[in-house]
Image (tube, helix red, strand yellow):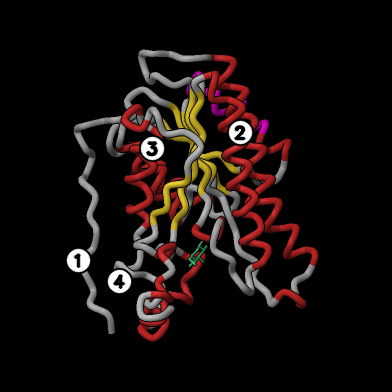
Amino acid sequence: MEQRLPEVVMPDCPVNKLLMGQKAIVTGANSGIGRAVAIALGHAGADVVVNYVVNAEEADAVCLEIERCGSRSLAIQADVSSEEQVLSMFSRAVETFGTIDILVNNAGIQRDAPFEEMTLEQWRQVIEVNLTGQFLCAREAIREFKRRGVNSKVSCAAGKIICMSSVHEIVPWAGHVNYAASKGGVMLMMKSIAQEVAPYRIRVNSIGPGAIRTPINRPAWETEAAYDKLMKLVPYKRIGEPEDIARAAVWLASDEADYINGTTLFIDGGMTLYPGFTENG
Ligand code: BGC
């Protein structure tokens, strides 16, 4: 069994509120990475739309946690792969909060299968949520950012988008071809949007998480044997926690990161360092 390090604990209701006065939408925010990001943005001073598809009670709990530190929140049910639902989510968000400064394009799914057994439905579901969903939300966010322009009272940028990608935007993944293809697509979509809208002071970046302890990859960490096997892929020898991603998302969305544009920040304990080469090659 690998050595277990102490849990990562975030400061409660931090006083240094990096995102004070900003308005954010986090998709897929009822669980996993999205949940932690929504809470961290809220605790950093942003008002947050907590988007979800199912499990309204989970979304409500995230809202309560955001409001506990003084920010406003609003749970909105919308399937990001539906154009109509995305449009209505953005108009409700703007009606309620006045504008949107930050989009965290987080919603994502896996539908794994050996390649020759992968159904068209499994392929489509993953591409539609992970890639088309990010496109639809990013487009609405960019429209709002351009409409409003820079409001220097809240941020020196007109808007920020963070796409939740994966190490699998660069690491091929057998048995998960639909997922890797969607994240590879997110990488060049993010960079192309960033290039196009940079002159409007809009920043578009990705976070590429490695193995993070969330429901999406439960089988990879829930037993001791699975955890030990997973650690062979992680030089830093611990699984990531959703808060590892959340802290970075707050910073990347803030003016502290103002000159960062069109980049993927990998947060993976070194998973992208080709750990197989440690004693080989
Ligand atoms: C996937 C997880 C996986 C991780 C590292 C993520 O993008 O969603 O299931 O554990 O990549 O392979």
Q: Which mark is first along the chain, 4 or 3?
A: 4
Q: Quadrant of residue 183?
A: bottom right
In front here: 208 or 122?
208
Q: Which residues are magenta?
A: 87-98
Q: Residues within 10 Å of mark 3 (few under 14, many from 20)?
A: many
Residue 6 circle label: 1
Q: Quadrant of the C terminus?
A: bottom left
Going 38% across and 51% down the picture, which residue do you hit? 245
Q: Amino acid at mark 2?
A: Ile
Residue 237 circle label: 4
Q: Quadrant of the N terminus?
A: bottom left
Residue 252 circle label: 3
Rendered view: 58 above or below 144: below
Q: Amino acid at mark 4?
A: Lys
What's the distance in space between the residues labelled 3 and 1, CA to CA? 25 Å
Q: Which mark is first along the chain, 2 or 3?
A: 2
On whether ligand 1 comes within 8 Å of the CB at mark 1, the answer is no
In front here: 4 or 99?
4
